[in-house]
């Protein structure tokens, strides 16, 4: 009997110029995904993924649909090579943007509707990011309580919050540029192993993204959202949800709420009898995080 699997889908930042080139050269099904996507978006998404330029691919408006499509194209490869792995997937999760990929895989959204939502989400978040100079900083090797103290100290009346609980010793904060700079300095002097400003457009998963929420909720109302056929773990509360109304609400909330990835993975590993995880899509970030959450748990991957 094949192993029970869980699929993990990457979020923004996993993109790189050249992704999906080999995948689409070898698998017609992957090429078809990109062809359909380009028709919906009105531009050559595969050309941007394979040839750049990086500044264009890295913009939030483009990177979110690019990762969504590349991840589902990578899934086509896995389905062609190891259909039993796909058939035995019993639960799924995605990091921030990746939650939409997980919902599409689980049948809650069609590929086309998911792409339309993700494209609007990316454009809305890009616009919100450009309204206020802001960013995100990864702090490695510090306890959450210590980082929360730094956030309170560094905020000085500006927006600054814990944005991503990724794994033990890897927490991301998010806020105005000046508050992030103050927090980075405090973390460096406070014993952090590393402090890494992230190459993102703005302060995702904070109240600075509020202007994006209304646009996202509006487009979510236009698509057919169904109960997922397998559990999809929400970033907001690290729990699965069946009710499309609740899923819609949480997807709007997700933009301004911390991503509880470590809690999501612990729930996934504890409750579904899973024997192997697969990271599906560009990059290897989620496999690295899983090693920090449970070093012994096998996590394989199929890259875009």
Image (tube, rainbow, N blue to C red):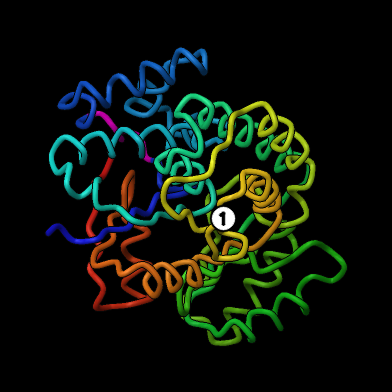
Q: Which of 114 and 65 is in front in this view?
A: 114
Quadrant position of the N terminus in the picture: bottom left
Compared across the picture, whether 153 is left or right of 7 comes to right
Classify the position of the C terminus by image quarter.
Answer: top left
Toward which corner of the image does residue 269 lie, by quadrant?
A: bottom left
**As rendered, which of 126 and 72 lies closer to the eye?**
72
Q: Position of residue 262 (x, y in %)?
A: 48, 71
Quick one: 108 or 206, which is closer to the camera? 108
The residue drawn where x is 21% and y is 41% is 78
Judging by the rendered image, the residue that carries numbered circle 1 is 241
Quadrant of the rendered image containing residue 258: bottom right
**Residue appearing at x 41%, y 47% in the figure:** 14
Q: Percent position (x, y) of residue 64?
A: 51, 37
- Residue 99 point in image, percent of width and height: 50, 48
Magenta-colored segment: predominant secondary structure: loop
Q: How many marks?
A: 1
Residue 257 within the segment the image draws in magenta: no
Say whether residue 57 is left or right of residue 211.
left
Coordinates of residue 115 in the picture (x, y in percent): 51, 29
The residue lying at 36 percent from left, 67 percent from top is: 272
Disc 1 secondary structure class: loop
Numbered range of the magenta stretch? 16-21
Among the 4 quarters of the image, the one containing residue 265: bottom left
Please tell me which residue is depicted at 44% across the width and 38% down the height of the picture: 107
Where 112 falls versus 154 (above or below)? Answer: above
Q: How many residues crowd mark 1 within 10 Å: few (<14), some (14–19), many (20+)?
A: some
Work out which residue is located at the far right of the displayed protein and give it. Answer: 157
Side of 198 relative to 10 (left or right): right
């Amino acid at each position: 009997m094949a192993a029970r699997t869980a699929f993990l889908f990457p979020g923004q930042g996993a993109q790189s110029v050249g992704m999906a080139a080999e995948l689409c050269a070898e698998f017609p099904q992957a090429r078809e995904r990109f062809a359909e996507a380009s028709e919906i978006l009105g531009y050559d998404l595969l050309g941007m993924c394979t040839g750049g330029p990086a500044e264009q691919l890295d913009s939030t408006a483009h990177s979110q649909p690019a990762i969504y499509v590349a991840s589902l194209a990578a899934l086509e490869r896995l389905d062609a090579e190891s259909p039993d792995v796909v058939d035995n997937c019993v639960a799924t999760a995605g990091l921030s943007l990746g939650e939409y990929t997980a919902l599409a895989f689980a049948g809650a959204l069609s590929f086309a509707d998911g792409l339309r939502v993700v494209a609007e989400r990316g454009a809305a978040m890009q616009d919100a990011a450009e309204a206020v100079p802001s960013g995100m900083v990864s702090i490695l090797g510090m306890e959450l309580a210590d980082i929360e103290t730094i956030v309170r100290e560094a905020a000085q009346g500006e927006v600054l919050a814990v944005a991503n609980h990724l794994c033990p010793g890897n927490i991301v904060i998010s806020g105005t540029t000046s508050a992030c700079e103050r927090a980075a300095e405090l973390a460096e002097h406070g014993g952090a192993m590393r402090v890494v400003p992230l190459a993102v457009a703005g302060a995702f998963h904070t109240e600075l993204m509020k202007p994006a929420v209304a646009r996202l909720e509006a487009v979510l109302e236009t698509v057919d959202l169904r109960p997922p056929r397998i559990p999809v773990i929400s970033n907001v509360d690290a729990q699965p949800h069946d009710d499309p109304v609740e899923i819609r609400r949480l997807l709007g909330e997700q933009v301004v709420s911390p991503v509880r990835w470590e809690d999501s993975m612990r729930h996934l590993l504890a409750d579904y009898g899973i024997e192997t995880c697969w990271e599906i899509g560009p990059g290897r970030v989620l496999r690295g995080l899983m090693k920090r959450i449970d070093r012994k748990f096998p996590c394989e991957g199929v890259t875009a």
